[in-house]
Image (cartoon, rainbow, N blue to C red):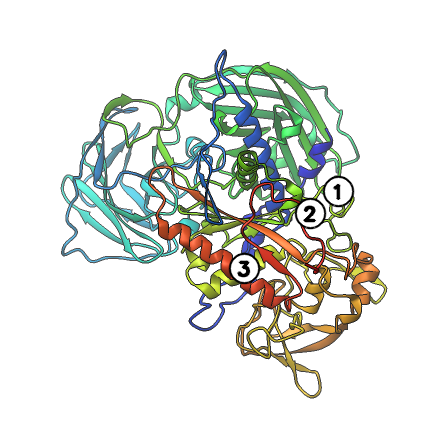
Amino acid sequence: LPAMTECRIISSPMRILRGLLAASILLAGSTHGQVFDCGTSDERIRHVEELALWGEARRAERPAGGARTFAAPNVEMRGRVVLLPADDINAPFRNPIRLEGRTLTFSRKDSETFVRRNVALEYEDRTGLQPASSTVTALYTLKNFEFPFYEKTVSQIRISPYNAIFPGEAPPTGDEQYTAAELAALRVPVIAPLWATPDAVPVQPAIYIRDTADRLVVTWAVDSASASYDVQATLFRNGDIRFSYKSLGLVRASALVITSASEPWRQRRAEIASVLDAANDVAGTPPATLRPLLDIDSVTAHRIDDSNLLEFRIKVRGTRQQFAAGESAGYYVYIGDPALRQYLAISMSDKGEGTYVSPVWGSKEPALAAWMEEDTVVFRTLQDYLAGVQGTVSIRAYTLGSGASNWSDSVSLSTVIGSGRKSVQTDFRTLTEDETSGPILEAFTLPPLNVGAVWSQIRSAYGYRDDEIDGVAIYQNFLTDLVLYAGAYSTGGNAGARGVKTATTLGPEFPRTPALMHMNKIGYGWNRNDDLAAHVVMHEFGHRWLLSLNIRESGAVTRVLNPASSHPAQYVHTAAPFRVRSERDASVMGGSSFAPNATNTSFTSPPFSNYSYSGLDLYLMGLASPDEVEPWFYIADSSPKLGDAYYPPPESTFSGTRRDVTIQQVIDAMGPRVPAYPGTQRHFRVLFVLVTDPDRPVEESEVEGVTRYASLLESGFAKATGRRAEVATFVAPGGGPRRRSAGR
């Protein structure tokens, strides 16, 4: 199973990214009022690859005796913009909330049953109430009654600023967004009309509370450029619950859920398959305390309550209490064809559950859908998130010890997973009235954009080849999950050059592939004006070559120039070799054009002017010879301390030790660039794409907006490279071979 070696390290792109952003700064001035949070990372690229494989498998699925489940979308070209409608492959599990102006009532019938109705808006006016705004979940004691909730009564609740009520302890706060699988696996009670993560609520709402003899009304209301809604939850003395959605102007991602976390449906398991494993067959020599935690006893797959919720249980020969301080282990379940790299994973340690990984959604923290019960690791996922599970399916479980490079133990089985008769998730938009003792939940999710599927669909429609396109800039006219963790990202692709990046699978001996660039929603965030949009698209296209390299310094190979990600550290001098916008231009990728004082002991950054490429950048891009790259420097031991990525605070002074760097140090660590300047590519082709909301017509202004972004790349790239190279953004299908040199 060679593909698995790429997936053994469980890490969270979200957590890594947050660490980078914590080290970054707010850019000054009216143009730059926020951190540029680029999501480009090795982990993100791996997730993109896995999502592309998932999409290919889903598209190939066929129902028994029927046609393919997913039809190809209608692709259209308007001017130099390709329009591609969003579908369940390129934007999977897109589920915007559509309950504005409606009320959902949940009438308690008994301790586990509710009658649910979708009715016209019933909303209690909050006039005269004093709003409260809190960054913490506050304990509240009901003043007039105890609330009957499933099999218990509740006298105290916790009211969350993230649009939820907790009848007991507050659950751990999730990152990015809640999926239906996470809601179905909750282990604490929740009552929420619009439960969100901190990532999804950039501006916290005001909270209004009305406590009367027969009901408690909690209202969450916010109206800003980044969040706008007015929703209400009412708890009645008789146990009824009401959710009211007065307005839903801008909601990033959220969830509707009512659960006691102990409803009987959760325990109704039907075994799909199980297998026993031999004892004492752990590979390697892990510590004695860890060894039983790596030794698999059995693996069982279940279906929960005849639904689409699956459960996988890995029983080991130790208990979670046996983790010694500092010890950790990874537990994995691979499902289906090994080539799909489709797996569930969780990291466990003496401190508890860590990162959870699932198909489609990637890494998530905390691990709401996976946990350890004494000697058993439990995973829950929706069958909808799995591809290629029709017919006989292979299930393989693995353990991995701290710092290990090989699997510690493994077991496999083959089975038919089949399908459940019902979904754990309700479409409350179409609900009229029903009665249920089952799950009450709906995840209003922003989709992960499947950039691999976008390119595959366009390539199929127009006959483009991987080797004739250098970049695919993909915008949307709707929100994706990108807004929860970054402003944009790029896969980089393979530019066909060696000596540029540390990755060993890039270079002229491997097939050329384009950089797939997820550029976010048009007009949103960093796309809201020309300066920002130009900066971002040049930055993401720059990732085709930049910046993942080592240098040789004092006899050792080090990644000191870009220690945390594919971006120069804030302390690196990345001055442009010629003027683009100012005399102090610097690389669009990061760093700054520092001005040293006379003794080279302090360094001052200019106003933000990162709209160019540095001399090092141009060399790596194949647009400059080594002899043309002037020596540069970085600031060691800076004070105040500068971060490991992006841009330093503008117009600020830092003390530190100047460390000079030459291009020869790069060549000594990376080898010479192949091909070398001047026999390099100078004409690049970037395709501009708008993935569109299929529920409404595309507006001409949206097409014009993407066309404007294309023009910004053409003009900005030419200036930033000293007109040594150019980008063409109209690429006719079947346009013939690219020009490889500057000559016309």
Which residue is at the front of the view, 69 or 669?
69
SS class, disc 1: loop
Label 3 belongs to which residue? 713
Amino acid, disc 1: Phe
Q: Residues within 10 Å of mark 2 (few under 14, many from 20)?
A: many
| Image location (x, y in percent) of residue 173 | 44, 46
Q: Residues within 10 Å of mark 3 (few under 14, many from 20)?
A: many
Look at the image and tell me in which quarter the N terminus lies.
top right
Going from N to C along the chain, the mark reached first, 3 or 2, is 2
Q: Residue at x 50, y 59 (%)?
A: 711
Q: Is residue 175 left or right of residue 108?
A: right
Amino acid, disc 2: Asn
Q: Which mark is residue 494?
A: 2
- Outermost residue on the right side: it is 555
Q: Residues within 10 Å of mark 1 (few under 14, many from 20)?
A: few
SS class, disc 3: helix
The answer to whether residue 21 is seen in the rendering is no
Amino acid, disc 3: Leu
Q: Residue at x 60, y 67 (%)?
A: 720
Label 1 belongs to which residue? 510
Q: CA distance from mark 3 to mark 2?
A: 20 Å
Going from N to C along the chain, the mark reached first, 1 or 3, is 1
Q: CA distance from mark 1 to mark 3?
A: 27 Å
The answer to whether residue 417 is seen in the rendering is yes
Mark 2–mark 1 contact, CB under 8 Å?
Answer: yes
Going from N to C along the chain, the mark reached first, 2 or 1, is 2
Look at the image and tell me in which quarter the C terminus lies.
bottom right
